[in-house]
Amino acid sequence: MKHFFFFLLLLLSVNEVSGQDLHFSQYFNSPLSLNPALTGLFPGRYRVGVSTRSQWAQTLETPYSTTAFAADFHYYVNPGKRQFKDAFGVGVLFASDRVSEINYSVNQIMVGGAFHKSLDPKNNQYLSLGVQLGVVQRNVSYDQLTFEDEFDGTGVFIEGATGEELPVNNYAFGDYQIGLNYSNAPRNRTAIFLGAAMHHVNEPEQSFFAEATQGEDIEVTNLLYRRYSAYLNLRIPLTREVLLSPRVYGFSQGPHRVANAGTNLRFLINDVNGAAFHLGAHARMITGEEDFALDSAVGMVGIEINSFLLGFSYDIGLNGLQTSRRHQGAFEINLSYTGQADDDEAVPCPQF
């Protein structure tokens, strides 16, 4: 019956509520899922990263997990020019949400590109436009579920005895995203990063029941809401060794509203190998019954060395559900590497 409860919960989330997208607390460490315009916007030739998030560990035998892998590449349009050096980026993103308890998963693969237009002779300012397109696939394994009419009354569930009419357990659809980003990052001065994105431009159908009920008197349909997001990030040098990065990020998807606000600090330890220590704290607010309510507090730490950046974060639940002993926060790990060449210039980009 526990498995059946989670199955009902998932059906509600994907067939009646238009469930929200995957998300990461370290959103700037998963730039391709944040905004397609960030594809190829970094100081290097290529960048690879992996993000993993685990939650509901006190409720499920195997925690609900989210994993994303991304790789993108940066190229100059006019590499011989010293002024107004336009660039473009290409990249690929694979992401997966999984509830192993009943083998439910949502997998997506996106390919995208972005054009970065230089706005000043020193190449400190860039305006970027990016797009992504790909496929999303949803799957649930019915052999992991048991139903009430399979119970024989003596403590045994008879496999396959249920009279439930279940839909096809695999469903896929195409998806599209578009984004804009503005960067102004002069050396040793305050930098600003401002961006906005629209995900699920086509509002695709996502219901497991859509094909099975097509043409019937009652058709079960559930379009995936468009997601509108925006962020603002500042990078303020307090001293030569310390950078302050206050930031806000919010998005709207159907009836859901989420806002994140906080700040990160970067402490330079060794200028030769670029070793640095990151420390941050954020608060997340969500739409309540009437207005925004505080949902989680997020603490972050990070280690940076030789183009590697490793970040750890933990979400502390502050709402009524998560503050109970059985519903605690989420743990997240992000690892990224930026490959550089000797002649690379400092292309402005947000980080961590």
Image (cartoon, helix red, strand yellow):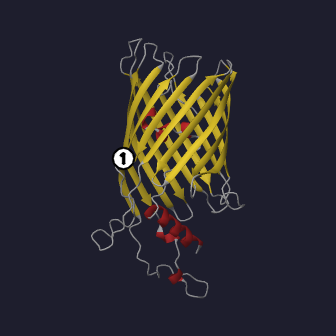
Please indicate, yes or no, whether residue 40 appears anywhere in the rendered image: no
From the top left corner, tell me how far across and down residue 175 is, in percent: 37, 48
Q: Quadrant of the N terminus?
A: bottom right
Q: Is residue 340 above or below residue 283?
A: above
Query: Residue 345 at x, y = what percent?
Result: 49, 18
Name the residue carrying label 1.
Answer: 201
- Rendered position, 287 above or below 143: above
State the residue at coordinates (53%, 75%): 146
Amino acid at circle 1: Val
Q: Residue at x 56, y 71 (%)?
A: 5
Which residue reaches farthest left? 215
Q: Is residue 143 in view?
A: yes
Q: Residue furthest right?
A: 325
The x, y position of residue 302, in whole percent, is 66, 35
Q: Position of residue 251 (x, y in %)?
A: 50, 45
Residue for point 51% across, 35% down? 48
Q: Secondary structure at mark 1?
A: loop
